[in-house]
Image: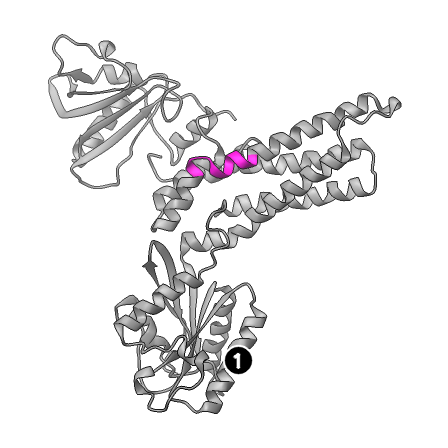
Amino acid sequence: MMFDKDTIAVISSPQGQGAISIIRVSGDKTHNAVEKIFRPKLKQKKYSDLKINKNYLGIIQHKDEIIDEVIISKLKKPNSFTGEDMVEIFCHGSTYIQNRIMELLSDRGIRTAKPGEFSLRSYVNGKMDLIQAEGISDLISSNSKASHKLAMNQVRGGVSNEIKKMRDELLNLSSLIELELDFSEEDVEFASRDKFLSLLNNVEEFISELVDSFKYGNAMKDGIPVSIVGSPNVGKSTLLNSILNEDKAITSPISGTTRDIIEDTFNIEGKLFRFIDTAGIRKTEDEIEKIGISRTLESINRSEIILYLIDLTSSDKNIDFEINESNKLKKKYKEKSIMLIFTKADLVKKQIKKTSLKKMLINTKEKKDVTYLKSKIIENLNQNFSNKLIITNSRHYSALSLAKKEINNVKKGLKNNVPSDLLTIDLKQVLYHLGEVTGEVTNEDILSNIFSKFCIGK
Protein backbone atom coordinates (compact mmCIF):
# COMPACT_ATOMS: atom_id res chain seq x y z
CA MET A 1 0.00 0.00 0.00
CA MET A 2 1.55 3.30 -1.13
CA PHE A 3 1.01 6.76 0.31
CA ASP A 4 2.73 10.10 -0.23
CA LYS A 5 6.01 10.67 1.56
CA ASP A 6 5.11 14.13 2.85
CA THR A 7 6.15 14.99 6.37
CA ILE A 8 2.97 15.61 8.35
CA ALA A 9 2.02 17.44 11.54
CA VAL A 10 -1.17 17.91 13.49
CA ILE A 11 -2.51 19.18 16.80
CA SER A 12 -3.44 15.91 18.54
CA SER A 13 -5.27 17.50 21.48
CA PRO A 14 -8.98 18.38 21.38
CA GLN A 15 -9.83 21.80 19.99
CA GLY A 16 -9.86 24.72 22.37
CA GLN A 17 -7.71 25.90 25.24
CA GLY A 18 -6.19 23.63 27.84
CA ALA A 19 -3.20 23.30 30.13
CA ILE A 20 -1.13 21.27 27.67
CA SER A 21 -1.42 20.55 23.96
CA ILE A 22 0.38 17.93 21.89
CA ILE A 23 1.61 18.49 18.34
CA ARG A 24 2.84 15.41 16.48
CA VAL A 25 5.24 15.49 13.53
CA SER A 26 6.16 12.47 11.38
CA GLY A 27 8.21 11.94 8.22
CA ASP A 28 11.68 12.33 6.72
CA LYS A 29 11.81 16.14 7.20
CA THR A 30 10.78 15.99 10.86
CA HIS A 31 14.12 16.52 12.60
CA ASN A 32 15.37 19.04 10.06
CA ALA A 33 12.22 21.15 10.49
CA VAL A 34 12.08 20.96 14.30
CA GLU A 35 15.78 21.78 14.58
CA LYS A 36 15.10 25.16 12.93
CA ILE A 37 12.44 26.21 15.46
CA PHE A 38 13.53 24.46 18.71
CA ARG A 39 16.37 25.61 20.98
CA PRO A 40 17.31 23.17 23.80
CA LYS A 41 17.74 24.63 27.29
CA LEU A 42 20.73 22.37 27.87
CA LYS A 43 23.82 24.53 27.75
CA GLN A 44 25.93 24.30 24.59
CA LYS A 45 23.65 21.63 23.15
CA LYS A 46 22.29 21.64 19.62
CA TYR A 47 19.18 19.77 18.50
CA SER A 48 21.38 17.35 16.55
CA ASP A 49 23.22 16.51 19.80
CA LEU A 50 20.04 15.40 21.55
CA LYS A 51 19.67 11.67 22.11
CA ILE A 52 16.87 9.60 20.64
CA ASN A 53 13.94 8.40 22.82
CA LYS A 54 14.48 11.20 25.32
CA ASN A 55 12.42 14.19 26.39
CA TYR A 56 13.96 17.67 26.34
CA LEU A 57 12.95 21.09 27.64
CA GLY A 58 13.47 24.01 25.31
CA ILE A 59 12.13 27.06 23.50
CA ILE A 60 10.09 27.26 20.30
CA GLN A 61 11.41 30.38 18.62
CA HIS A 62 11.10 32.25 15.31
CA LYS A 63 13.87 34.83 14.83
CA ASP A 64 13.53 37.07 17.92
CA GLU A 65 10.01 35.88 18.77
CA ILE A 66 9.86 33.39 21.65
CA ILE A 67 6.60 31.48 21.16
CA ASP A 68 6.58 29.01 24.05
CA GLU A 69 8.62 26.92 26.43
CA VAL A 70 7.96 23.31 25.50
CA ILE A 71 9.02 19.71 26.02
CA ILE A 72 9.80 17.61 22.96
CA SER A 73 10.12 13.86 22.57
CA LYS A 74 12.63 12.93 19.86
CA LEU A 75 12.07 9.59 18.07
CA LYS A 76 13.95 7.90 15.23
CA LYS A 77 12.61 5.44 12.66
CA PRO A 78 11.71 2.63 12.87
CA ASN A 79 11.23 2.90 16.64
CA SER A 80 8.23 5.21 16.68
CA PHE A 81 4.46 4.90 16.45
CA THR A 82 4.44 5.51 12.69
CA GLY A 83 7.74 3.73 11.99
CA GLU A 84 9.10 7.08 10.73
CA ASP A 85 11.16 9.86 12.27
CA MET A 86 8.84 11.55 14.78
CA VAL A 87 8.74 14.40 17.26
CA GLU A 88 6.01 15.12 19.77
CA ILE A 89 5.85 18.72 21.02
CA PHE A 90 4.18 19.33 24.40
CA CYS A 91 3.30 23.03 24.46
CA HIS A 92 0.92 25.16 26.50
CA GLY A 93 -2.70 24.85 25.44
CA SER A 94 -3.16 28.36 24.08
CA THR A 95 -4.92 28.30 20.71
CA TYR A 96 -2.50 30.98 19.49
CA ILE A 97 0.57 28.95 20.52
CA GLN A 98 -0.73 25.79 18.87
CA ASN A 99 -1.54 27.54 15.61
CA ARG A 100 1.74 29.49 15.61
CA ILE A 101 3.81 26.31 15.94
CA MET A 102 1.79 24.70 13.13
CA GLU A 103 2.48 27.80 10.97
CA LEU A 104 6.24 27.49 11.57
CA LEU A 105 6.15 23.81 10.60
CA SER A 106 4.09 24.61 7.51
CA ASP A 107 6.65 27.23 6.45
CA ARG A 108 9.21 24.41 6.43
CA GLY A 109 7.24 22.22 4.03
CA ILE A 110 5.27 20.17 6.52
CA ARG A 111 1.58 19.71 5.74
CA THR A 112 -1.33 19.12 8.12
CA ALA A 113 -2.16 15.43 8.58
CA LYS A 114 -5.50 13.99 7.51
CA PRO A 115 -7.73 12.09 9.99
CA GLY A 116 -6.14 8.75 10.86
CA GLU A 117 -2.99 9.39 8.82
CA PHE A 118 -0.60 8.64 11.68
CA SER A 119 -2.29 5.26 12.27
CA LEU A 120 -2.34 4.60 8.51
CA ARG A 121 1.42 5.11 8.33
CA SER A 122 1.87 2.86 11.34
CA TYR A 123 -0.11 0.14 9.53
CA VAL A 124 1.68 0.62 6.21
CA ASN A 125 5.08 0.50 7.92
CA GLY A 126 4.23 -2.78 9.66
CA LYS A 127 3.96 -1.40 13.18
CA MET A 128 0.46 -2.83 13.55
CA ASP A 129 -2.11 -4.74 11.50
CA LEU A 130 -5.53 -3.50 10.49
CA ILE A 131 -7.38 -5.05 13.44
CA GLN A 132 -4.99 -3.36 15.87
CA ALA A 133 -5.38 -0.03 14.08
CA GLU A 134 -9.17 -0.26 14.31
CA GLY A 135 -8.76 -1.27 17.95
CA ILE A 136 -7.04 2.06 18.60
CA SER A 137 -10.09 3.89 17.25
CA ASP A 138 -12.36 1.77 19.46
CA LEU A 139 -10.07 2.39 22.44
CA ILE A 140 -10.39 6.15 22.03
CA SER A 141 -14.18 5.93 21.87
CA SER A 142 -14.58 3.28 24.61
CA ASN A 143 -17.08 4.41 27.26
CA SER A 144 -17.14 1.49 29.69
CA LYS A 145 -14.82 -1.03 31.28
CA ALA A 146 -16.16 -3.77 29.00
CA SER A 147 -15.73 -1.80 25.74
CA HIS A 148 -12.27 -0.71 26.91
CA LYS A 149 -11.31 -4.34 27.54
CA LEU A 150 -12.52 -5.40 24.09
CA ALA A 151 -10.62 -2.58 22.36
CA MET A 152 -7.45 -3.22 24.37
CA ASN A 153 -7.53 -6.89 23.40
CA GLN A 154 -7.63 -5.84 19.73
CA VAL A 155 -4.79 -3.35 20.16
CA ARG A 156 -2.65 -6.00 21.84
CA GLY A 157 -3.22 -8.39 18.94
CA GLY A 158 -5.47 -10.95 20.64
CA VAL A 159 -7.73 -11.51 17.63
CA SER A 160 -4.99 -10.85 15.06
CA ASN A 161 -2.60 -13.46 16.40
CA GLU A 162 -5.18 -16.25 16.31
CA ILE A 163 -6.38 -15.37 12.80
CA LYS A 164 -2.79 -15.17 11.51
CA LYS A 165 -2.01 -18.52 13.12
CA MET A 166 -4.98 -20.18 11.40
CA ARG A 167 -4.17 -18.48 8.10
CA ASP A 168 -0.53 -19.62 8.22
CA GLU A 169 -1.58 -23.23 8.80
CA LEU A 170 -4.00 -23.07 5.86
CA LEU A 171 -1.34 -21.39 3.72
CA ASN A 172 1.14 -24.18 4.42
CA LEU A 173 -1.48 -26.76 3.54
CA SER A 174 -2.38 -24.90 0.36
CA SER A 175 1.29 -24.95 -0.66
CA LEU A 176 1.44 -28.72 -0.20
CA ILE A 177 -1.70 -29.24 -2.28
CA GLU A 178 -0.33 -27.02 -5.05
CA LEU A 179 2.89 -29.04 -4.92
CA GLU A 180 0.83 -32.13 -5.70
CA LEU A 181 -0.10 -30.57 -9.03
CA ASP A 182 3.56 -30.79 -10.11
CA PHE A 183 3.45 -34.55 -9.50
CA SER A 184 -0.08 -35.17 -10.78
CA GLU A 185 1.07 -37.98 -13.09
CA GLU A 186 2.66 -39.83 -10.18
CA ASP A 187 -0.48 -39.70 -8.01
CA VAL A 188 1.45 -38.34 -4.99
CA GLU A 189 -0.37 -36.96 -1.93
CA PHE A 190 1.69 -34.47 0.08
CA ALA A 191 -1.19 -33.23 2.21
CA SER A 192 -3.08 -35.86 4.19
CA ARG A 193 -6.80 -35.41 3.44
CA ASP A 194 -7.71 -36.48 6.98
CA LYS A 195 -5.40 -33.87 8.49
CA PHE A 196 -6.69 -31.35 5.97
CA LEU A 197 -10.30 -31.97 7.03
CA SER A 198 -9.37 -31.82 10.70
CA LEU A 199 -7.69 -28.46 10.20
CA LEU A 200 -10.67 -27.14 8.26
CA ASN A 201 -13.01 -28.20 11.06
CA ASN A 202 -10.83 -26.41 13.63
CA VAL A 203 -10.68 -23.25 11.54
CA GLU A 204 -14.42 -23.36 10.90
CA GLU A 205 -15.14 -23.74 14.63
CA PHE A 206 -12.83 -20.84 15.43
CA ILE A 207 -14.36 -18.58 12.78
CA SER A 208 -17.90 -19.56 13.83
CA GLU A 209 -17.16 -18.50 17.41
CA LEU A 210 -15.89 -15.13 16.19
CA VAL A 211 -18.89 -14.64 13.90
CA ASP A 212 -21.29 -15.56 16.71
CA SER A 213 -19.48 -13.18 19.07
CA PHE A 214 -20.16 -10.15 16.86
CA LYS A 215 -23.70 -9.55 18.10
CA TYR A 216 -22.55 -9.72 21.71
CA GLY A 217 -19.40 -7.66 21.08
CA ASN A 218 -21.29 -4.96 19.22
CA ALA A 219 -23.79 -4.75 22.06
CA MET A 220 -20.98 -4.49 24.61
CA LYS A 221 -19.48 -1.58 22.65
CA ASP A 222 -22.70 0.39 22.07
CA GLY A 223 -24.66 -0.66 25.16
CA ILE A 224 -26.36 -4.01 25.77
CA PRO A 225 -30.05 -3.45 24.92
CA VAL A 226 -32.46 -4.32 27.74
CA SER A 227 -36.20 -4.06 27.03
CA ILE A 228 -38.59 -3.42 29.91
CA VAL A 229 -41.90 -4.95 28.78
CA GLY A 230 -45.29 -5.91 30.20
CA SER A 231 -48.91 -4.82 30.35
CA PRO A 232 -49.86 -1.13 30.75
CA ASN A 233 -49.42 0.38 34.22
CA VAL A 234 -47.27 -2.48 35.47
CA GLY A 235 -44.42 -0.19 36.59
CA LYS A 236 -42.11 -0.16 33.53
CA SER A 237 -41.50 3.60 33.50
CA THR A 238 -41.07 3.68 37.28
CA LEU A 239 -38.44 0.94 37.00
CA LEU A 240 -36.58 2.81 34.25
CA ASN A 241 -36.51 5.96 36.36
CA SER A 242 -35.27 3.99 39.38
CA ILE A 243 -32.47 2.34 37.40
CA LEU A 244 -31.32 5.65 35.89
CA ASN A 245 -31.84 7.60 39.13
CA GLU A 246 -33.77 10.29 37.25
CA ASP A 247 -37.28 11.04 36.01
CA LYS A 248 -36.64 10.02 32.43
CA ALA A 249 -40.12 8.66 31.73
CA ILE A 250 -43.51 10.06 32.72
CA THR A 251 -45.26 7.88 35.29
CA SER A 252 -49.00 7.86 35.92
CA PRO A 253 -51.69 5.53 37.29
CA ILE A 254 -53.45 5.99 33.94
CA SER A 255 -52.87 3.00 31.66
CA GLY A 256 -51.10 3.59 28.36
CA THR A 257 -49.09 6.66 29.38
CA THR A 258 -46.02 5.43 27.47
CA ARG A 259 -46.83 5.31 23.76
CA ASP A 260 -43.31 5.32 22.35
CA ILE A 261 -40.06 3.74 23.43
CA ILE A 262 -37.84 5.75 25.82
CA GLU A 263 -34.24 4.68 26.27
CA ASP A 264 -31.04 5.67 28.01
CA THR A 265 -27.72 4.07 28.92
CA PHE A 266 -26.49 3.10 32.36
CA ASN A 267 -23.23 1.52 33.50
CA ILE A 268 -23.47 -1.51 35.78
CA GLU A 269 -20.22 -3.05 37.04
CA GLY A 270 -18.25 -1.73 34.07
CA LYS A 271 -20.75 -2.87 31.45
CA LEU A 272 -22.83 -0.39 29.46
CA PHE A 273 -26.53 -1.23 29.21
CA ARG A 274 -29.16 0.49 27.07
CA PHE A 275 -32.44 0.31 28.99
CA ILE A 276 -35.58 0.67 26.87
CA ASP A 277 -38.95 1.56 28.39
CA THR A 278 -41.65 0.29 26.04
CA ALA A 279 -45.36 0.82 25.50
CA GLY A 280 -47.61 -1.58 27.41
CA ILE A 281 -48.71 -4.61 25.43
CA ARG A 282 -52.49 -4.95 25.20
CA LYS A 283 -55.32 -5.05 22.67
CA THR A 284 -56.29 -1.52 21.67
CA GLU A 285 -58.11 0.40 18.96
CA ASP A 286 -56.00 3.51 19.51
CA GLU A 287 -53.86 3.93 16.36
CA ILE A 288 -51.05 5.77 18.16
CA GLU A 289 -50.91 3.15 20.90
CA LYS A 290 -50.82 0.44 18.23
CA ILE A 291 -47.70 2.04 16.76
CA GLY A 292 -46.14 2.11 20.23
CA ILE A 293 -46.91 -1.59 20.78
CA SER A 294 -45.43 -2.40 17.37
CA ARG A 295 -42.22 -0.63 18.40
CA THR A 296 -42.25 -2.60 21.65
CA LEU A 297 -42.17 -5.85 19.66
CA GLU A 298 -39.29 -4.47 17.56
CA SER A 299 -37.43 -3.57 20.75
CA ILE A 300 -37.89 -7.10 22.11
CA ASN A 301 -36.49 -8.47 18.86
CA ARG A 302 -33.25 -6.45 19.07
CA SER A 303 -32.66 -6.77 22.83
CA GLU A 304 -30.25 -9.14 24.54
CA ILE A 305 -32.13 -9.06 27.85
CA ILE A 306 -35.88 -8.70 28.43
CA LEU A 307 -37.29 -7.65 31.77
CA TYR A 308 -40.85 -8.99 31.72
CA LEU A 309 -42.87 -7.21 34.43
CA ILE A 310 -46.02 -8.65 36.01
CA ASP A 311 -48.28 -6.71 38.39
CA LEU A 312 -48.73 -8.71 41.63
CA THR A 313 -51.82 -6.70 42.56
CA SER A 314 -53.71 -8.10 39.56
CA SER A 315 -55.84 -11.26 39.74
CA ASP A 316 -54.34 -14.74 39.96
CA LYS A 317 -55.85 -15.48 36.57
CA ASN A 318 -54.10 -12.49 35.01
CA ILE A 319 -50.78 -13.37 36.69
CA ASP A 320 -51.00 -16.91 35.28
CA PHE A 321 -51.79 -15.47 31.85
CA GLU A 322 -48.76 -13.16 31.95
CA ILE A 323 -46.47 -15.99 33.10
CA ASN A 324 -47.72 -18.04 30.15
CA GLU A 325 -47.00 -15.09 27.79
CA SER A 326 -43.46 -14.78 29.14
CA ASN A 327 -42.92 -18.52 28.57
CA LYS A 328 -43.97 -18.04 24.95
CA LEU A 329 -41.29 -15.38 24.60
CA LYS A 330 -38.71 -17.74 26.10
CA LYS A 331 -39.56 -20.39 23.51
CA LYS A 332 -39.47 -17.87 20.67
CA TYR A 333 -36.22 -16.20 21.75
CA LYS A 334 -34.14 -19.03 23.20
CA GLU A 335 -30.91 -17.07 22.76
CA LYS A 336 -32.18 -14.14 24.85
CA SER A 337 -32.19 -13.79 28.61
CA ILE A 338 -35.80 -13.23 29.73
CA MET A 339 -36.20 -12.25 33.37
CA LEU A 340 -39.61 -12.49 35.02
CA ILE A 341 -40.12 -9.65 37.51
CA PHE A 342 -43.12 -9.25 39.83
CA THR A 343 -43.79 -5.63 40.72
CA LYS A 344 -45.73 -3.64 43.33
CA ALA A 345 -44.63 -5.99 46.09
CA ASP A 346 -45.31 -3.22 48.62
CA LEU A 347 -49.01 -3.16 47.66
CA VAL A 348 -49.60 -6.90 47.87
CA LYS A 349 -51.76 -7.89 50.83
CA LYS A 350 -52.42 -11.48 49.85
CA GLN A 351 -49.99 -14.25 50.76
CA ILE A 352 -47.72 -15.34 47.91
CA LYS A 353 -47.77 -19.13 47.80
CA LYS A 354 -46.08 -19.82 44.47
CA THR A 355 -42.31 -20.05 44.97
CA SER A 356 -41.74 -18.99 41.35
CA LEU A 357 -43.26 -15.60 42.18
CA LYS A 358 -40.95 -15.07 45.15
CA LYS A 359 -37.78 -15.35 43.04
CA MET A 360 -37.98 -11.79 41.68
CA LEU A 361 -40.53 -9.89 43.75
CA ILE A 362 -39.64 -6.20 43.93
CA ASN A 363 -40.88 -2.73 44.65
CA THR A 364 -39.64 -0.65 41.68
CA LYS A 365 -39.40 2.45 43.91
CA GLU A 366 -37.27 0.74 46.55
CA LYS A 367 -33.53 1.37 46.10
CA LYS A 368 -32.40 -1.95 47.61
CA ASP A 369 -34.79 -3.86 45.32
CA VAL A 370 -33.49 -2.06 42.24
CA THR A 371 -29.88 -2.70 43.34
CA TYR A 372 -30.73 -6.38 43.70
CA LEU A 373 -32.29 -6.36 40.22
CA LYS A 374 -29.14 -4.82 38.75
CA SER A 375 -27.06 -7.62 40.23
CA LYS A 376 -29.42 -10.21 38.73
CA ILE A 377 -29.14 -8.51 35.32
CA ILE A 378 -25.36 -8.96 35.47
CA GLU A 379 -25.84 -12.61 36.43
CA ASN A 380 -28.25 -13.16 33.54
CA LEU A 381 -26.01 -11.45 31.01
CA ASN A 382 -24.88 -13.92 28.40
CA GLN A 383 -21.42 -14.96 29.59
CA ASN A 384 -20.70 -17.40 26.75
CA PHE A 385 -17.95 -15.15 25.44
CA SER A 386 -16.47 -13.94 28.71
CA ASN A 387 -13.20 -15.82 28.23
CA LYS A 388 -13.16 -15.93 24.44
CA LEU A 389 -12.11 -13.66 21.63
CA ILE A 390 -14.78 -11.21 20.52
CA ILE A 391 -15.17 -9.09 17.40
CA THR A 392 -17.04 -5.78 17.40
CA ASN A 393 -16.43 -4.57 13.84
CA SER A 394 -18.93 -5.18 11.01
CA ARG A 395 -16.07 -5.35 8.49
CA HIS A 396 -14.52 -8.26 10.41
CA TYR A 397 -17.91 -9.95 10.68
CA SER A 398 -18.52 -9.73 6.92
CA ALA A 399 -15.06 -11.04 5.93
CA LEU A 400 -15.18 -13.90 8.45
CA SER A 401 -18.68 -14.90 7.32
CA LEU A 402 -17.40 -15.16 3.74
CA ALA A 403 -14.37 -17.17 4.91
CA LYS A 404 -16.70 -19.58 6.72
CA LYS A 405 -18.77 -20.00 3.55
CA GLU A 406 -15.65 -20.80 1.50
CA ILE A 407 -14.47 -23.33 4.09
CA ASN A 408 -17.74 -25.20 3.59
CA ASN A 409 -17.04 -25.25 -0.15
CA VAL A 410 -13.59 -26.73 0.48
CA LYS A 411 -15.09 -29.39 2.78
CA LYS A 412 -17.67 -30.30 0.13
CA GLY A 413 -14.88 -30.60 -2.39
CA LEU A 414 -12.96 -32.98 -0.12
CA LYS A 415 -16.08 -35.06 0.42
CA ASN A 416 -16.68 -35.30 -3.33
CA ASN A 417 -12.99 -36.01 -4.09
CA VAL A 418 -12.61 -33.02 -6.40
CA PRO A 419 -9.17 -32.53 -8.02
CA SER A 420 -6.46 -30.66 -6.11
CA ASP A 421 -6.47 -27.69 -8.48
CA LEU A 422 -10.15 -27.04 -7.73
CA LEU A 423 -9.57 -27.39 -3.99
CA THR A 424 -6.89 -24.73 -4.06
CA ILE A 425 -9.25 -22.24 -5.74
CA ASP A 426 -11.71 -22.37 -2.82
CA LEU A 427 -8.88 -22.51 -0.31
CA LYS A 428 -7.36 -19.34 -1.74
CA GLN A 429 -10.70 -17.61 -1.21
CA VAL A 430 -10.60 -18.61 2.48
CA LEU A 431 -7.08 -17.19 2.76
CA TYR A 432 -8.16 -14.03 0.96
CA HIS A 433 -11.04 -13.30 3.33
CA LEU A 434 -8.95 -14.04 6.44
CA GLY A 435 -6.28 -11.71 5.04
CA GLU A 436 -8.93 -9.02 4.59
CA VAL A 437 -9.60 -9.02 8.34
CA THR A 438 -5.98 -8.40 9.39
CA GLY A 439 -5.13 -6.22 6.39
CA GLU A 440 -2.70 -8.66 4.76
CA VAL A 441 -5.04 -8.40 1.79
CA THR A 442 -6.64 -5.01 1.17
CA ASN A 443 -7.01 -2.13 -1.25
CA GLU A 444 -6.68 1.63 -1.18
CA ASP A 445 -10.43 2.33 -1.04
CA ILE A 446 -10.92 0.14 2.03
CA LEU A 447 -8.00 1.75 3.86
CA SER A 448 -9.19 5.22 2.97
CA ASN A 449 -12.66 4.41 4.31
CA ILE A 450 -11.31 2.95 7.55
CA PHE A 451 -8.76 5.59 8.48
CA SER A 452 -10.82 8.59 7.39
CA LYS A 453 -13.13 7.81 10.34
CA PHE A 454 -10.30 8.17 12.86
CA CYS A 455 -10.03 11.33 14.93
CA ILE A 456 -7.57 14.07 13.98
CA GLY A 457 -4.08 13.40 15.33
CA LYS A 458 -4.43 9.62 15.41
Left or right, 54 with respect to 329, comes to left
Q: Quadrant of residue 97?
A: top left
Q: Position of residue 380 (x, y in %)?
A: 44, 63
Asked if 140 appears above or below 121 in the picture, the reply is below
Identify which residue is drawn at 35% across, 65% down: 374
What colour scheme was applied to this rendering of the protein? one colour
Amino acid type of the residue tagged 1 in the rendering: Glu
Q: Position of residue 18 (x, y in %)?
A: 17, 39
Quarter holding the C terminus?
A: top left
- Residue that mark 1 sits on: 325
Asked if 305 appears above or below 426 in the picture, the reply is below
Say if residue 451 shows up in the picture: no
User: Is residue 454 or residue 414 the one in the foreground?
Assistant: 414
Say if residue 244 shows up in the picture: yes
Residue furthest right as drawn? 185
Identify which residue is drawn at 55% across, 38% down: 437
Identify which residue is drawn at 42% across, 53% down: 220
Q: Quadrant of residue 236?
A: bottom left
Identify which residue is drawn at 57% across, 36% down: 436
Magenta stretch holds residue 225: no
Magenta stretch holds residue 162: yes
Q: Position of residue 364 (x, y in %)?
A: 32, 76
Asked if 151 appears above or below 42 in the picture, the reply is below
Q: Quadrant of residue 80?
A: top left
User: Is residue 319 or residue 19 the one in the foreground?
Assistant: 319
Under circle 1, the secondary element is: helix
Point out the stretch of residues depicted in magenta: 154-163
Q: Position of residue 381 (x, y in %)?
A: 44, 60
